[in-house]
Image (cartoon, rainbow, N blue to C red):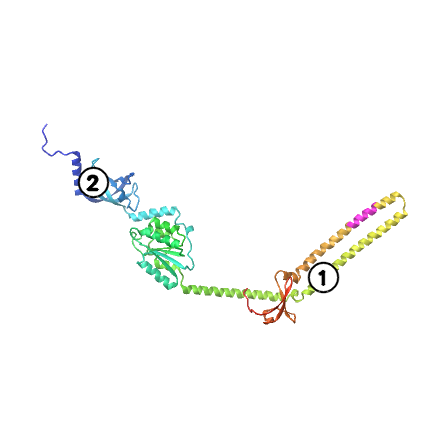
């Protein structure tokens, strides 16, 4: 066997030369393909295959790069991947070490937006039942935004123009870039603990990347958990963020948020004046009704001649009482007459049997007499009760006992019907349901609220 004159390579040397050639010749490339055989190791690195209709290549994405993806890779997903072509020496397989990856046809941020929106909606963070109404006239307004951006200037300009004396507390926060979401969350929680009446969280418009902090899960949950009503004012009218869905109210711009949170001072004054006018008209109608009812009451028989009503009822009561007494007297007289006859008959008829029968008849008559007397008395009482009740119902004293009073001017003893019937220093006599007072007028009110 002849000795080869060419250089003899080990498998390792050959593999490394192939690796060097591939990495030097191809370097970093972009590939389009479908994810297959997706696996994530315990170390956090991902191993999978990228394939198309006719070929496939092994791929690996290490934990650090994987954590920066804005979407969750999954089996069957079409992606665009950027990475370094290399060789895995242990098996001699060529592979691509991926540095970046995004869904094909849909931006990674947009895909992450839709997936997080679906997740948070399923948890109920966007439910209308959780949303609070804004206070009508807040005293302290909290704002979480950049202190140097156009949004804060727009908000302050609108608030100053509409209600210059309102108190605004600004919590500065970055509104884009790394760390912005954490600062926005800190601002929301600080103002919530501070106790503002309403809060505006937002910024001006921008790209999806610029607005991304307001799509971060920690920001959405902070808005949902806040006790203070929050207006989300992120971007322009066509832009939506996940913060918009979680907030109690969404405004298309920061200026619109400021207009929603406070009403114009002049418009509020006009509304108060309209309510004052309506209140005055309502009170006037009520007073007119009360005066009419008072005039009707003053013209009634009860107030004009109350003693006559009592006198007539007393007379009727006496009449019924006398009729009752007369009826009882007639019954007693008849019974006594029959008793006398029986006594005389007993005296005339001496046999013992007749005497016994007479005694029995006498006992029965006596029972009937007592029963008849009770019945008559009860019947008269029953007839008298409703009349007494009517007498009490129409009694002026019963009316006065319910909290009313009637007054006379002294010494003329003329009835006081209105405040115009008396003057300051006049002496008056006021009768209540129980007792009366004598007083001197020291002040007269022409009108009193109903």
Label 1 SS: helix
- From the image, tell me which residue sits under label 1: 314
Q: Main secondary structure of the magenta part?
A: helix
Residue 44 lies, in percent from the top left, at: 29, 40
Residue 144 lies, in percent from the top left, at: 35, 55
> Looking at this rendering, what residue extends furthest in the top direction?
1
Q: Nearer the viewer, residue 431 or 419?
A: 431
Q: Is 236 on the left or on the right of 354, as rendered?
A: left
Q: Is 165 on the left or on the right of 433, as rendered?
A: left
**Splitting the image into 4 quarters, where does residue 1 fall?**
top left
- From the image, tell me which residue sits under label 2: 86
Q: Nearer the viewer, residue 55 or 81?
A: 81
Q: Is 309 on the left or on the right of 262, as rendered?
A: right
Magenta residues?
360-370
**Splitting the image into 4 quarters, where does residue 439 fall?**
bottom right
Query: Quarter of the image containing the C terminus?
Result: bottom right
Q: Residues within 10 Å of mark 2 (few under 14, many from 20)?
A: many
Q: Are marks 2 and 1 in contact (CB under 8 Å)?
A: no
Q: Residue at x 51, y 66 (%)?
A: 281
Does residue 52 show up? Answer: no
Which numbered disc flags the more N-terminal residue, 2 or 1?
2
């Amino acid at each position: 066997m002849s000795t080869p004159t060419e250089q003899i390579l080990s498998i390792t040397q050959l593999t490394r030369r192939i690796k060097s050639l591939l990495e030097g010749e191809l370097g970093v490339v972009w590939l389009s393909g479908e994810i297959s055989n997706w696996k994530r190791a315990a170390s956090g690195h991902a191993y999978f295959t990228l394939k198309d209709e006719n070929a496939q290549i092994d791929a690996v994405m290490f934990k650090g790069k994987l954590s920066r993806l804005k979407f969750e890779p999954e089996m069957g997903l079409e992606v665009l991947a950027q990475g370094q072509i290399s060789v895995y020496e242990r098996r001699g397989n060529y592979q691509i070490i991926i540095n970046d990856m995004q869904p094909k046809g849909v931006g990674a941020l947009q895909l992450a937006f839709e997936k997080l929106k679906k997740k948070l909606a399923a948890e109920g963070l966007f439910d209308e039942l959780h949303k609070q109404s804004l206070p009508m006239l807040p005293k302290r307004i909290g704002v979480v935004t950049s202190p140097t951006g156009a949004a804060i200037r727009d908000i302050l300009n609108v608030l100053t123009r509409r209600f210059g004396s309102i108190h605004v507390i600004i919590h500065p926060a970055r509104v884009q870039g790394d760390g912005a979401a954490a600062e926005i969350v800190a601002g929301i929680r600080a103002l919530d603990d501070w106790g503002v009446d309403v809060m505006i969280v937002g910024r001006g418009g921008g790209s999806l990347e610029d607005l991304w902090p307001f799509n971060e899960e920690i920001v959405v949950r902070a808005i949902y958990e806040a006790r203070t009503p929050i207006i989300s004012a992120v971007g322009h009218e066509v832009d939506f963020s996940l913060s918009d869905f979680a907030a109690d109210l969404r405004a298309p711009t920061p200026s619109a948020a400021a207009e929603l949170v406070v009403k114009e001072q002049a418009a509020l004054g006009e509304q108060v004046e309209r309510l004052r006018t309506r209140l005055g008209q309502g009170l006037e109608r009520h007073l007119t009704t009360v005066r009419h009812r008072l005039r009707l009451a003053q013209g009634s028989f009860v107030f004009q001649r109350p003693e006559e009503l009592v006198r007539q009822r007393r007379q009727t009561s006496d009449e019924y009482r006398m009729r009752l007494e007369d009826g009882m007297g007639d019954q007693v007289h008849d019974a006594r007459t029959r008793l006398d006859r029986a006594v005389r008959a007993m005296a005339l008829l001496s046999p013992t049997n007749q005497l016994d029968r007479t005694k029995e008849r006498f006992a029965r008559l006596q029972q009937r007499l007592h029963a008849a007397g009770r019945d008559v008395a009860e019947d008269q009482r029953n007839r008298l009760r409703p009349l007494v009740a009517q007498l009490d119902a129409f009694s002026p004293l019963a009316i006065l006992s319910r909290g009313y009073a009637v007054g006379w001017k002294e010494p003329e003893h003329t009835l006081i019907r209105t405040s115009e019937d008396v003057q300051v220093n006049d002496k008056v006599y006021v009768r209540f349901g129980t007792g009366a007072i004598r007083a001197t007028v020291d002040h007269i009110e022409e009108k009193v609220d109903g």
